[in-house]
Image (cartoon, grey):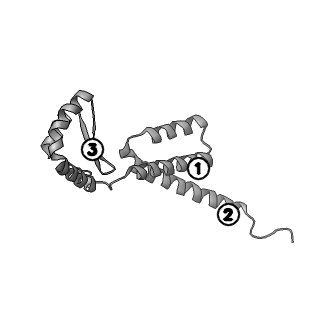
Amino acid sequence: MSTLIEEAKAAGVRVYLRDGKVKLRGSDEAMEAIRAKLAPHKEEILAYLQSAEQHAAEFWPWAPYLTVSDVERFRTELVAMIEKLAEMEQWPDEHRDDVLARAIRGPLADLLPNLHHFNQRLTEATAEAAAREAVDKRTWRFDR
């Protein structure tokens, strides 16, 4: 099966799985040419792609498998962390926008380290703010 899929890839056709069905993407001419070769093996290709989809994490062994929704959720959390940190530390708008742009447009490999970094900085900033607030509060009164 992998040889047929590699042959399709060499022809510029991407073979993928969507909603349990085998789909092709590429130029019309290339797709028509490769479709005739793939059609007799449709069930085997379907099983191969389903197996590859289930074991996708094996190809990225040093990190957890992230689905699209995981990446979207992590990026949303990262943006919220950066905005809160920028507000707490009173960053200039240009600096905040630059950091946000780099975080949003950055490579996927930077996502988890950025989450860790900004979570740590936000935790420190929150602790500092709580300490300042505790010092500013009067726990007893002088005017008795």
Mark 2 crowd level (few <14, some 14–19, many ≥20, 10 Å Cα): few
Q: In the drawing, what numbered circle is on residue 84? A: 1
Tell me the quadrant of the picture where the C terminus can be found: bottom right
Badge 3 vs badge 1, beta-carbon distance below 8 Å:
no
Q: Is residue 88 above or below residue 13?
A: below
* Distance from Cα at disc 3 to Cα at disc 2: 57 Å
Badge 1 vs badge 2, beta-carbon distance below 8 Å:
no
Disc 3 element: strand
Q: Which residue is labeled 3 in the image?
A: 16
- Residue type pointed to by label 3: Tyr
* Distance from Cα at disc 3 to Cα at disc 1: 40 Å
- Position in image of residue 6 (x %, y %): 16, 39
Instruction: Write the residue at 58% across / 45% down.
Output: 86
Residue 28 image-quadrant placement = top left
- Residue type pointed to by label 2: Ala
Q: Which residue is labeled 2 in the image?
A: 134
Instruction: Write the residue at 19% across / 47% down.
Output: 42
- Position in image of residue 13 (x %, y %): 23, 34
Residue 13 in view here: yes
Instruction: Write the residue at 46% across / 47% down.
Output: 75
